[in-house]
Amino acid sequence: MKKENVIEAHQLTKTFGDFTAVNAISFEVKKGEIFGFLGANGAGKTTAMKMLIGISKPSSGSAKVAGFDVYTQTESIKKNIGYMSQKFALYDDLTVNENITFFGGIYGLPRKKIKEKREQLVSELGLENISNKLVGSLPLGWKQKLSFSVSLLHEPKIVFLDEPTGGVDPITRRQFWEMIYKAADQGTTIFVTTHYMDEAEYCDRVSIMVEGKIEALDTPKKLKEQFNVDSMNDVFLKLARNIE
Ligand SMILES: Nc1ncnc2c1ncn2[C@@H]1O[C@H](COP(=O)(O)OP(=O)(O)OP(=O)(O)O)[C@@H](O)[C@H]1O
């Protein structure tokens, strides 16, 4: 059975004055897929992601996210997605438990469900001993794992991760990716931007943006074949060089 598309973008474009930050990008993402969204600094990834999560109106083109239109159904989009970025995470001055309770409330979960989720999450992450500690006192890697779990509290269809593992050590990044795989196995679609090329290898498919356009999109294996190289890092370098 063919899996349904949960993201569909067609000629999606965003301009700021004369400058085109996202230039007619088209792609689809399937249910449960781990979709890597790559590009150098300033390529347009965040701008594209903002249109998809319903906080920035496209200049032209069309897109549907979880079946909802990015122009007219942004409230429905927000209810059906999770979002996590390296910059926007949890509240440092609330405890682990308080953060979970707070975000559960924002997502509109009933109190009983929040309690259930909180217990489950604290136990899965092994945070029992520190659940009453301020999040600000936790190491960055823990904060990011917790932040990812919190972005999944309302069981969204798609989770958007904007450089979720920035600044953490390779072992913690690997653990973070295990969490990503688990969520994808359970049917959550993962849309992830990253600067780490080893992480690009973990994605089912990867798109590479250069100056607002998607210049390559395929599985890591096929991209390596296409560019006749051994690593995603070399795919990335070759593509950037060709464009210059
Ligand atoms: N509100 C805005 N007004 C004008 N230009 C903008 C605005 N937002 C983004 N840009 C420009 O659009 C381009 C793409 O930026 P964007 O943040 O989407 O890139 P990115 O690929 O996410 O980069 P990074 O990896 O550094 O986050 C940049 O040149 C940026 O300066």
Image (cartoon, rainbow, N blue to C red):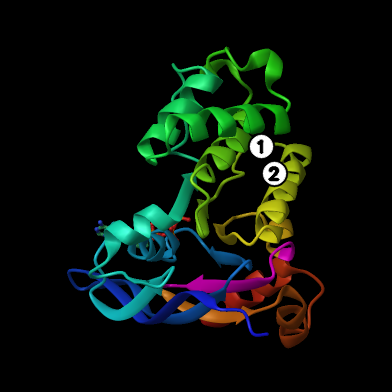
Q: Residue at x 47, y 58 (%)?
A: 41
Q: Is residue 30 left or right of residue 56?
A: right
Q: Circle 2 is placed at which residue position? A: 176
Rate crowding at label 2 as few (under 14), some (14 to 19) or many (20 or more) other CA atoms within 10 Å: many
Numbered label attached to residue 217? none
Q: Position of residue 75 (x, y in %)?
A: 28, 57
Q: Relative to residue 183, is residue 21 depicted above or below? A: below
Q: Residue at x 57, y 12 (%)?
A: 132
Query: What amino acid does circle 1 point to?
Result: Val
- Give the image quadrant in which the ligand numbered 1 is located: bottom left
Q: Examine the structure image and report whether residue 128 is included in the region drawn in magenta.
A: no
Q: Is residue 219 left or right of residue 43?
A: right
Q: Residue at x 46, y 27 (%)?
A: 101
Helix, strand or loop at label 1? It is loop
Q: Is residue 70 left or right of residue 165?
A: left
Closer to the chain start, of discs 2 and 1, is 1
Helix, strand or loop at label 2? It is helix
Q: Are marks 2 and 1 in contact (CB under 8 Å)?
A: yes
- Report the span colored magenta: 201-211
Q: Examine the structure image and report whether residue 204 is included in the region drawn in magenta.
A: yes
Query: What amino acid does circle 2 point to?
Result: Phe
Is residue 54 something one can see in this rendering?
A: no
